[in-house]
Image (cartoon, grey):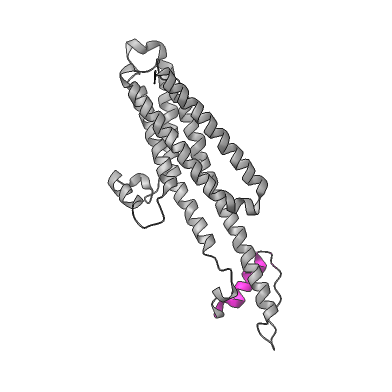
């Protein structure tokens, strides 16, 4: 369900103004989702202008399926715009976490120590006579860095999976588009080609956002980073193959 703060509730102008502002979101990830959303919408439009026409009666069921599946993908792309923004905010929050002892307000030291202990860090008690010893400050700082690093890695994984989902859906939409040349309204073949370029752009743009989060993931889990790279790479290859096939079928 789309909430009131969703980019889906913005006018085109409002969204573009937000995109061009100094605010951190929306950004490239949301733009990637929007590009693919336009592609899916165009596939729906072509299918709708084909369904019910006697000339394309033998392809009626195909175009109904394309329309219905493209609509589902369009809604997911719209959600993807918001998912990207939410994931980015968590990454920003993680990078904003304290990592030095000097980053902590003095009246929060005891509370921070308890938070670090709750996170599994072993922090000694404050010595009643000596107070905050250099050793204790080092232990706290080490804990801060470890917790911050873990938070960045976790947030970065979520921030990579959001555009990866857009990549998967973009390829799914390209698979639909590959069925349309020759089987959908020939007068709208140009719209299928535009949809293909929108989806290809969304696919590659989403890949850049996956790639941007890999360094932080790799520091935490190199194997996972490798899996994400492999998955994204295979989607790029499939998407490029599908797009080329569509162009060939269209005589381009």
**Residue 14: x and y, percent?**
29, 49
Q: Quadrant location of the C terminus?
A: top left
> With respect to residue 22, does 183 lie above or below?
above
Q: Among all residues in the image, which is located at the extreme bottom?
A: 129
Q: Main secondary structure of the magenta part?
A: helix
Q: Is 181 included in the stretch rendered in magenta? A: no
> With respect to residue 214, does 168 lie above or below?
above
Q: Residue at x 37, y 11 (%)?
A: 57
> With respect to residue 101, does 119 lie above or below?
above
Q: Residue at x 52, y 35 (%)?
A: 168
Residue situated in front as seen by the camera: 83 or 150: 150
Count the numbered circles shown.
0
**Residue 118: x and y, percent?**
65, 66
**Residue 39: x and y, percent?**
39, 32
Residue situated in front as seen by the camera: 183 or 245: 245
Q: Among all residues in the image, which is located at the extreme front?
A: 252
State left or right for residue 46 relative to residue 129. Answer: left
**Residue 218: x and y, percent?**
63, 50
The answer to whether any part of residue 65 appears in the image is: no
Q: Quadrant location of the N terminus?
A: top left
Q: Residue at x 59, y 41 (%)?
A: 229
Q: Is 119 included in the stretch rendered in magenta? A: yes
The answer to whether any part of residue 42 appears in the image is: yes
- Give the image quarter of residue 147: bottom right
Residue situated in front as seen by the camera: 102 or 154: 102
Magenta stretch? Answer: 107-121
């Amino acid at each position: 369900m789309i909430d009131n703060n969703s980019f889906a509730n913005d006018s085109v102008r409002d969204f573009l103004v937000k995109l061009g502002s100094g605010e951190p979101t929306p950004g490239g990830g949301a733009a990637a989702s929007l590009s693919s959303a336009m592609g899916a919408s165009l596939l729906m439009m072509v299918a709708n202008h084909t369904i019910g026409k006697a000339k394309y009666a033998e392809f009626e069921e195909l175009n109904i399926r394309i329309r219905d599946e493209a609509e589902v993908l369009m809604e997911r792309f719209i959600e993807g715009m918001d998912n990207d923004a939410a994931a980015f905010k968590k990454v920003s929050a993680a990078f904003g976490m304290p990592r030095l002892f000097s980053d902590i307000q003095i009246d929060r030291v005891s509370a921070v120590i308890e938070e670090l202990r709750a996170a599994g860090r072993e922090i000694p008690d404050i010595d009643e006579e000596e107070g905050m010893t250099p050793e204790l400050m080092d232990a706290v700082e080490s804990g801060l860095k470890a917790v911050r690093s873990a938070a960045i890695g976790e947030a970065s994984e979520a921030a990579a999976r959001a555009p990866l989902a857009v990549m998967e859906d973009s390829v799914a939409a390209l698979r639909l588009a590959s069925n349309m040349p020759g089987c959908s309204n020939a007068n709208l073949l140009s719209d299928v080609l535009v949809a293909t370029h929108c989806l290809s752009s969304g696919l590659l743009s989403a890949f850049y956002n996956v790639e941007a989060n890999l360094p932080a993931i790799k520091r935490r889990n190199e194997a996972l980073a490798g899996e994400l790279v492999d998955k994204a790479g295979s989607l790029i290859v499939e998407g490029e193959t599908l797009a080329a096939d569509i162009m060939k079928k269209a005589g381009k």
